[in-house]
Image (tube, rainbow, N blue to C red):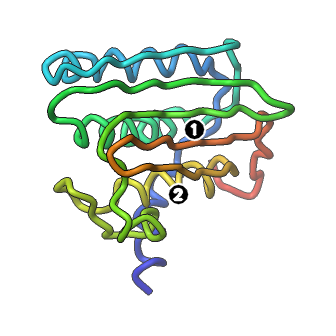
Amino acid sequence: SLTDMLNGLLGIFKEESFTPCSLVGVSREIIEELRPVCNVQNINLEFSAHDNVQIQLQVALFKRAIYNLLKNSIKAMPDGGKISLNFFKEKGKVLISIEDNGPGVPPEIQDKIFEPFVHGRQSGTGLGLYMVNYAITTVHKGRIWFNTKPGKGTTFYIEIPFVQELDSTVDK
């Protein structure tokens, strides 16, 4: 099926191994990369971490997922706005939220936003959120969900367990 084919394509990301890293450090790198675009578009990008969490991640894939979510928020607010990236430590888990005050997710795509080839108002492949979902749920064994209000904004939530059971059957 098409989904199997896409998962096969996404499987090329699997070569990376899990590395313990600081979520704050990883986030700062992403934010520095996006800061110039935000400045041009008059977007206030804020970041707060309540703890500097060390967590096992496939770093490149995780960074790409957070980057995609932030980039979607930026694209949704061509006339400026505010984005907040926050981390909280919960029992055995990290909770990440990405909140924007953009136009919100159009109602007609809300329940299929993580499926492949779903487009919001932006151009693109329609694979961005599919890739994000894959990276968070399949690779990092986490969860992702969102709340959105038309004209008020959208918040994406990501929950990732601290300890990844490393799959010893995967060839390194």
Farthest right residue? 91
Residue at (75% x, 52% y) in the render? 167
Residue at (56% x, 24% y) in the render? 86
Residue 129 in percent (x, y) is at 41, 55
Mark sitting on residue 58: 1
In-front residue for pair 52/149: 149
Badge 2, how many Cα within 10 Å: few under 14, some, many 20+? many
Q: Is residue 117 above or below residue 27?
A: below
In-front residue for pair 15/150: 150
Residue at (61% x, 39% y) in the render? 17
Residue 165 in percent (x, y) is at 80, 46
Element type where label 1 sits in the image: loop
Element type where label 2 sits in the image: helix
User: Residue 22 appears in which quarter of the rendering?
Assistant: top right
Q: Is residue 97 above or below residue 89?
A: below
- Badge 1 amino acid: Gln
- The reply to whether callout 2 and callout 1 are in contact (CB within 8 Å) is no
Q: Which of the two discs, 2 and 1, labels the residue nearer the N terminus? A: 1
Question: Which circle, 2 or 1, is nearer the viewer?
Answer: 2
For label 2, the residue is: 134
User: Residue 164 appears in which quarter of the rendering?
Assistant: top right
Badge 1, how many Cα within 10 Å: few under 14, some, many 20+? many
**170 relative position to 91: left or right:** left
Residue at (75% x, 25% y) in the render? 89
- Badge 2 amino acid: Tyr
Callout count: 2
Distance of mark 2 from mark 1, alpha carbons? 12 Å
